[in-house]
Amino acid sequence: MKNWAGNLEYSSARVERPESVAELAQIVERAARVKALGSRHSFNRVGDTDGVHVLLDALPQHIALNADRNTVRVSGGVSYGALCRTLEQSGVAIHNLASLPHISVAGAVQTGTHGSGVDNPSLAGAVQSIDLVRPSGETVTLSREDGDEFLASVVGLGALGIVTGLELAVQPSFEMRQRVLEDLPWERALAAFPEIMSSAYSVSLFTNYAGDTISQVWLKALGSEPPLTDLFGATAALRPRHPLPDMSAENCTIQLDEPGQWLDRLPHFRHEFTPSKGEELQSEFILPLEHAPDALQAVRSLANKLAPLLFVSEIRTGAADEFWLSPFYKQQSVALHFTWKPLQAEVEALLPELEDLLRPFGARPHWGKLFSPGGHDWETLYPRFAGFRSLASSHDPEGKFRNALLDSILGVPAASGR
């Protein structure tokens, strides 16, 4: 069994598809090692195990709106695409979406996945409560009233339990427009970076860091925001665009300022088009927004090494949150995303140099993408890291939910015998 990109084969001894949470709890209780997999849209081994893999797609897929609480309760294995269609039918929305709507809610939240917008929290920001299966098979629900335990568990890397459900905040449905601008001069982008990234509800920049211009600016604007046809020297595209210049925009969400609902504009790609597999790798580094111009200049110094390995790089922003291992913990941030060609050896050889460049800016790697686990001072990057490690050891002293990657980050549990 392989991941979404096909760049790794999982190590599990067997795969189970429980049809109920009770059956899942029994599997977890009996297993020596166990991990859950969702849409497998992860590029490293954060979800790997040498024991039992449980797939959550056979669990009952519930989506239940609570109008009194302005929340929706959703099974962990549900995709954002399925969730959003159901929400829109009831006239409600969630605050933001990632570029792909095909990913599972639980997997996206557990790894700190996000959309864009200087005032928009990551997808975890919507979570009001979370349902977990602990290593013993016990099922628990944690809410914001549970304080630190809740804040540690939402972006939990699967180390504190298997997520079977979440309660998410919803808001009234809203209309958006999307426009792509082209050829934003780097000099002007760096000089006016906060203003550019605040020019619409959600803004993304696409580049390979070579040359004097950023090739595309994607603006996702609310109905109340005025349309932009130029921005610091960038001019409006006259036809729909794909982030990659030589690809058709057929599977991209509608552009050219045509009004539509939030779920059909916030992602970059349409839910009805299944994304390709096995054709890319991904890395991402999240750092304080105020460091963005200097960090981007540093990355540009590597353009001659980056460009041959890149399909494209996306630059986004996100609001601060309170989740202990969220890359957005306590900081409004910029996220530098790298979509690599399927050249893993070459990418992994370059990553330490890229990480060294970004280290002075406090860059936090995205937990589900490629990075060098030994190249980061986790306790400096995450002020609550020691507390998270203590909770993980307390809840899972035998390391049932661990794997080699998590051990390299959190340390080997004392009671695990490994």
Image (cartoon, rainbow, N blue to C red):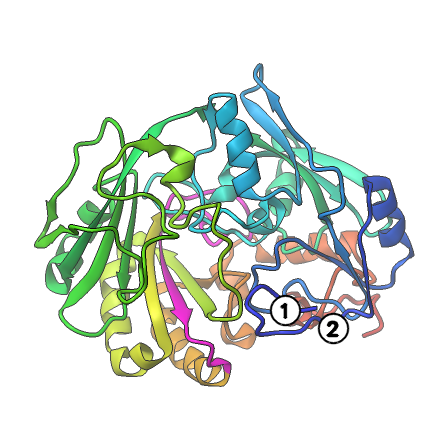
Q: Amino acid at mark 1?
A: Arg
Measured along the vertical axis of the image, is residue 179 above or below residue 34? above
Where is residue 129 shown, x and y percent of the image?
A: 64, 33
Residue highlighted by disc 1:
45
Q: Check disc 2 and report its element: helix, strand or loop.
A: loop
Residue 389, picture quadrant: bottom right
Few, some or many residues within 10 Å of mark 1 (<14, 14–19, 20+): many
Residue highlighted by disc 2:
11
Q: Is residue 63 visible?
A: yes
Where is residue 139 shown, x and y percent of the image?
A: 81, 40
In the foreground, 341 or 318: 341
For the N terminus, the quadrant is: bottom right
- Residue at position x 39%, y 38% from top? 264
Magenta portion: prevailing SS class: loop
Q: Check disc 1 and report its element: helix, strand or loop.
A: loop
Is residue 260 found left or right of 418 in the rendered image?
Answer: left
Magenta segment boundaries in residue numbering: 318-344
Q: Amino acid at mark 2?
A: Ser
36 is within the stretch colored magenta: no
Kindly indicate whether the residue at mark 2 contacts the one at mark 1 (C-beta within 8 angstroms). Answer: yes
In the foreground, 31 or 225: 225
- Residue at position x 62%, y 66% from top? 3
Residue 190, picture quadrant: bottom left
Is residue 245 found left or right of 51 in the rendered image?
Answer: left
